[in-house]
Amino acid sequence: MFPSAHIDTFCRENLPPIESWPQLNQEFNSRYPERLNACVELLDNTIAEFGGDRRAIIAAEGELSYNELLAKVCQVANLMREKGIVPGNRVLLRGPNNASLAILWLAILRIGAVAVTTIPLQRAVELEKIVEIAFVEYAFIDHRYMEEWELTTNLSAQSFIYGNGDGFIESAASQPSTCTPCDTASDDVSILAFTSGSTGIPKATMHFHRDILAIADTFSAEILKPTSDDLFAGTPPLAFTFGLGGSLIFPLRVGASTLLLEGATPPVLLEKIAEYKVSVLFTAPTAYRAMLKVGKPELAISLRRCVSAGEHLPESTWHAWYEATGMKLIDGIGSTEMLHIFISASDGEIKPGMTGKPVPGYEAIIVDEDFMELPAGATGFLAVRGPTGCRYLNDKRQSVYSVNGWNVTGDLYLEDEDGYFKYLSRSDDMIISSGYNIAAPEVENALLTHPAVAEVAVVGEADDERGMLVVAYVVLNREYAGSPELIKEMQDHVKAKIAPFKYPRKINFVDMLPKTTTGKLQRFRLKN
């Protein structure tokens, strides 16, 4: 590794041992210099190539050109330094997709700190885990999302409010509009992206400055092929690496524009696409199906690229979208551990029903439980490697995801004779619903805090609209009786305990749960 610019050495010291990393595509990564700052690449160098008067961001706060965006990033970065933030400090962000969040994220990278972006819907109990694992030292919270933040019990981070008219970003306006960037190494950690573990305990994935560029120079450059005239939009939060790439990294890498939406329902998303003439869209299959139900395909006429990821794309959805709009959905599988999409296809290479082929720079195989490579047509575990790879922050689960130099994603796939990969199912207790990863044990733990619940098992159930539904099987305590009112009460209870999107859409009352002779829960026996 190269000499780090981090004064706070927490991230470098808590990287997993190099021998436990997956094998990286060093030939690809050698294109990046030893000293590299991702903010400089995405702003300063983009301005040098494409010009600074180009539109960069459209958001609730208005429009910003590249020059205006860089100036604001520099002002915020200068104030961050003045407040004591040094290279390597972990800085938490909590807010919706808008210009303010993008400015804060870019400023953190510019000064060499480490961005820890969270989902606005997360509750205090979820935030506490993130704060503890990442040893968060500073936090920037949108004024509308302070309540759960203030309920966290382990806070030692210095918190700043923004977006209320006189918050941190407004205060930064008096700072100089130029800022010398930190001389970070290309392999200095730039972000900690959290992913739900199948056990309900989140994992922090550690990504370098060069990784930020690698996903733009692989999937975006080779499959998406954007131009500086494109306008990007999407629904995933910037806390999801799918959204971070599609709504910020990819457009800035090529001098394009991005429309940042603070949570748009499918009908609103369609209206925004038509209003602003969006040309590149990132969202989950659930949203594409919902937009089809609106029945106004003419609103999508400006689109030339539509990317689907975050959950399995059914072949029926692909055909329905194509028949309605004439657009071929670009399917893809990615992961937080890999940062973005690593198997996909576009244009004439698309085979409906298949995820695609390894993105240039990546390679993939199908293996059995003994890690023996399987022949074409055989079902097994997907293993992949490329310029990015899994590095968990101080987590024993590193050895589960990184095996024999490969990243093992937890997905069951097959590869056909033509080298296309087809998704079959998950191999663990992760439920992927509407693009969100939901750990069954986490929902179970929330339900167990309700006084009516004696035992519970949570599984995923196939669903045409959401891909999967969260379904709970509940054994009630003796003094309670099942009823629609109790179901509603339990659902509201879960929404209050953890992020609302994780609540069980169905609750079934049962007399007992399937278990082994040793008492271990057998969730698989409840799955359809």
Image (spheres, rainbow, N blue to C red):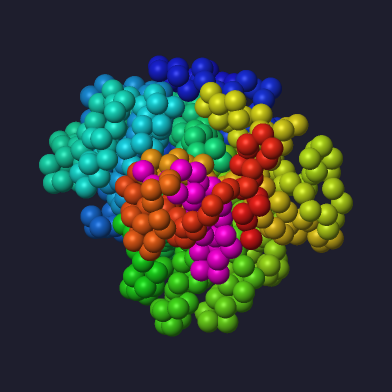
Q: Is residue 239 visible?
A: no
Q: Nearer the viewer, residue 526 or 76?
A: 526
Confirm whether the magenta stretch covers residue 450.
no
Q: Residue furthest left?
A: 166
Q: Nearer the viewer, residue 431 or 10?
A: 431
Q: Is residue 220 above or below residue 156?
A: below
Q: Quadrant of the N terminus?
A: top right
Q: Is residue 136 visible?
A: yes
Q: Quadrant of the C terminus?
A: bottom right
Residue 310 picture quarter: bottom right
Q: Would residue 372 be found to the left or right of residue 196 on screen?
A: right
Majority secondary structure of the magenta segment? strand
Q: Residue furthest front?
A: 479
Across and down, in percent, residue 388 comes to: 61, 38
Q: Nearer the viewer, residue 500 or 402?
A: 500
Q: Would residue 380 be found to the left or right of residue 48 on screen?
A: right
Across and down, in percent, residue 522 comes to: 64, 45
- Identified at 12% across, 42% down, the residue is 166
- Identified at 72% across, 47% down, the residue is 382
- How many labels, in total? 0
Residue 103 picture quarter: top left
Residue 225 picture quarter: bottom right
Confirm whether the magenta stretch covers residue 469.
yes
Across and down, in percent, residue 274 comes to: 37, 75
Q: Would residue 97 be found to the left or right of residue 172 on screen?
A: right
Across and down, in percent, residue 367 comes to: 79, 44
- Identified at 25% across, 26% down, the residue is 158
Which residue range is magenta in the image? 451-476
